[in-house]
Image (cartoon, grey):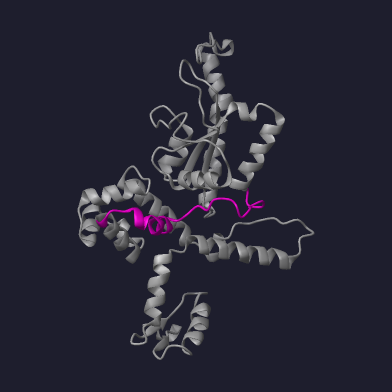
Amino acid sequence: MSDGIRIPGNEGFSRQQIEARRTEILEPYQKKIAYTRDARRAASQPTLFFSMHSCTPVFGNQPPRPWHIGIMSDGDWRIGDALIEFLEKETNFCIGRNQSYEINTATDYTIPVHAIGRSLPYVEIEIHQDLIGDEAGQQAWADLLTDIFPDGSTAKNTAPAVRSLREQVRQKLPDFTDAERRVAQTLLADYPVAGLETIARFAKRAGTSGPTILRFVSQLGFQTYADFQNALHEEIHIRLQGPLTHYPSASHPEKTDLTEQVSETMRANIATVSQALAQEDLREITALLSDVDRTAFFLGGRFSHILATYFHHYMRELHPKVRLVRDTSAT
């Protein structure tokens, strides 16, 4: 029975028939997900877990469901918040937060096992069935979801960015309490090491209490401190790989001009950086660089040393105390 309606195809099953469904449908589906997930991790490819369902306009004796789309999470809102923000900006949809259903780790399977259990960012959506009842509606939603969750070769500038924890903390700084803001500043000052310590050591660093640390990670969308640390470990795992693994492979139409490809990539990179830039940080950096009584040091890494050198050459025309830290003098 579902919503008072008999489903004859699910009635009268023997144990053998139930096992047949499990081995023919459920297990191959779950094994394929697990294989893909593990293969992406082995290749150091960041993974976002996306689950899609549809919901009936009315359920039981409840009022009609007004939501065009529901965005669901069991506490990790890294993707859900970005998706809601995107849909509110780009559409006129009525959006439900954990509506018309909620993820239940006790009774659900795919999201809890493959995403929550491995601290992968995830989101589940429910689309109102009236909106996908015909081919035109299905195509419209397919186009929208392709823009939001591209396959690597069809990414558009309107898709919501998946932010790192560092970026999320920076964006939420104005929303934290004073005590939570001290925690955030402590984490940003020694990222991600501070967040990998025990709650007690992290709290001592920030000059606050353990409960404040837990409220802080909850504000970031994590149910437990362990979930927060698992997310940091996942970021570290990706960053420790070689530079080439950080770039997704993307196919381009054969007729696309190479100059156009490079220009579009540069524009997208600049837009991403601009969106993640905290204006308060920019003002503070500008003020520090404008203080001619301070000595400004410029240094970079494996590739960014070129940018440090470039910046230094410009600043030495404006600032009397600038120094470039070269590889041989880094110590």
Q: Residue furthest front?
A: 92
Image side of residue 143 versus residue 288, left or right? right
Image point 67% across, 67% down: which residue?
263
313 vs 196, nearest the viewer: 313
Percent across and percent down for residue 258 are 73, 66
Q: Nearer the viewer, residue 177 or 40?
A: 177
Total number of numbered discs in the rendering: 0
Residue bounds of the magenta highlight: 151-178
Left of 130 or right of it: where is 314? left
Give residue 269's position: percent from left, percent from top: 57, 64
State the image quarter where residue 248 is shown.
Answer: bottom right
Q: Is residue 147 visible?
A: yes
The answer to whether residue 264 is above or below residue 289 is above
Classify the position of the C terminus by image quarter: bottom left
- Please give the name of the residue rendered at 65% of the width and 26% of the height, measured from the top-left corner: 133
Q: Could you tell me which residue is drawn at 63 percent across and 57 percent down?
A: 249
Instruction: Residue 93 in the image: state x and y as whole percent.
Output: 55, 37
Does the magenta run of residues contain 167? yes
In the image as oriented, which residue stretches furthest toward the top? 12
Q: Within the magenta stretch, is there residue 132? A: no
Q: Is residue 190 visible?
A: no
115 or 148, nearer to the observer: 148
Q: Residue at x 50, y 47 (%)?
A: 85
Q: Residue furthest right?
A: 255
